[in-house]
Amino acid sequence: MQLPFISVILPVRNEEKYITACVKSIFSQDYPAEQMEVIFVDGRSEDRTVELLRGLQEVHPQIVVLDNPDRTVPYAMNIGIRASRAEVIVRLDAHAEYPADYIRLSVETLLTKDCDNAGGVFDTRGRGFMGEAIAEMLRTPLGVGNATYRLTTEDGYVDTVPFGCFRRELFDRIGGFDERMTRNQDNELNFRIRKNGGKIYLNHNIRVHYYCRDTMRGIMKMGYMNGKWNVITMALVPGSMGVRHFVPLAFVLSTVVLVLLTLITRSMLFGGLLALEWGAYLLLDAFYSYTIAKEKGLKFLPVEIVLYPAFHFAYGFGSLCGIAVLPRFLKEERQKKTRQDGDDKGKRA
């Protein structure tokens, strides 16, 4: 197969810890370097990210650095797509490293399978002891539910993949990334692809080494923000999120309700249901924590036992906060759309 010229696009912001290794992995690909441009769209980084990229440009002239004043990922992707020169877009993330065949397999899969987006599997990794512990948690069904792109060893059509590889004409046909989505922009785009009759294909040989958060605070913040944005995304784009995204919300809500009912009614029924729910959860927690510790070392056992409920409660609490802020968020979006429509009418006049 003749490999086409491609545009690789990466949104970046404050990635000085990861950017050099990421660039090294991109230019260690078995895809011809002369057949790609690599566009970094920076969201006004406050560290040395841009400085490092400017230095790397001297070695790799294929690198293009663009400014993203709006700072979030969907704005960055749309800026990159508009500036791109190729008919094939490969969306990457700077918080990761890529095996030598990642880009080639992505492009080949897109061009040989009946699909509009081709992607692969997250190989979650961590730096330091806590990062490694968090990565192990995120490799288990209890940690990530039934997220196919984290757990599968099979190829096939799926509802979503991380990052992705697209024909540029797709964005002309269905529109770019939804700029309302501070998070979940990939889920929303893949939902829109399916809604418009398209397909997403996962090739399990395409693997990305993704570096997860490496502190307890970091993973809890991630869980909180994911939970919050899952609610907002579902309200903005009904059907774009799966049931698994709201399991932590159901867990936190049921715990709070059962505790309150037990205290108010003094009924053994509600207390028994609470004990049953938490007994089952703690058994799963202990099982998966022990499974990890058996392979990685007993020092992981107490950390994993705490990580699971900390992550799940942060996630569920984030969803509760998402419900609380949703009316104000939707109101602000309506006002923003009204102003934008007014500006558009003024330009046409």
Image (cartoon, rainbow, N blue to C red):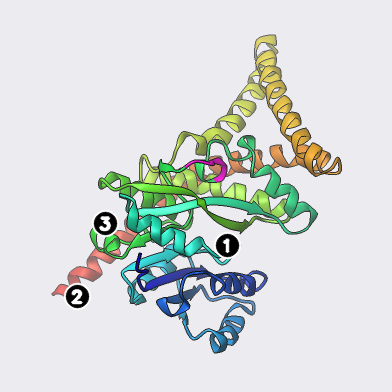
Depth check: 292 or 78 in front? 292
On screen, 250 above or below 53? above
Q: Nearer the viewer, mark 1 or mark 3?
A: 1
Task: Decide if residue 263 is in sight here.
Answer: no
Q: Is residue 147 left or right of residue 167?
A: right
User: What's the distance in space between the residues labelled 3 and 2, CA to CA?
Assistant: 24 Å
Name which of mark 2 and mark 1 comes first in the sequence: 1
Identity of the residue drawn at 46% across and 75% down: 32
Q: Which residue is mark 2?
A: 347
Query: For the residues marked 1 and 3, what is the alpha-carbon distance in whole angstroms?
Result: 31 Å
Residue stretch in magenta? 150-154
Which residue is depicted at the point 78% across and 40% down?
295
Residue 301 picture location, percent across and down: 82, 39
Magenta: main secondary structure equals loop
Give the residue type that dot 1 points to. Answer: Pro
Q: Which mark is residue 174?
A: 3
Residue reaching furthest to the left: 349
Q: Is residue 101 left or right of residue 292?
A: left
Circle 1 sits in a helix, a strand or a loop, which is it?
A: loop
x%, y% of residue 21?
A: 64, 71
Give the quarter of the figure containing the C terminus: bottom left
State the CA–CA distance, disc 2 to disc 1.
Answer: 48 Å
Circle 2 residues within 10 Å: few <14, some 14–19, many ≥20: few
Of helix, strand and loop, which one carries label 3?
helix
Residue wearing tag 1: 99
In this view, the residue farthest toward the top is 268
Q: Looking at the image, which residue is at 60% across and 77% down?
A: 49
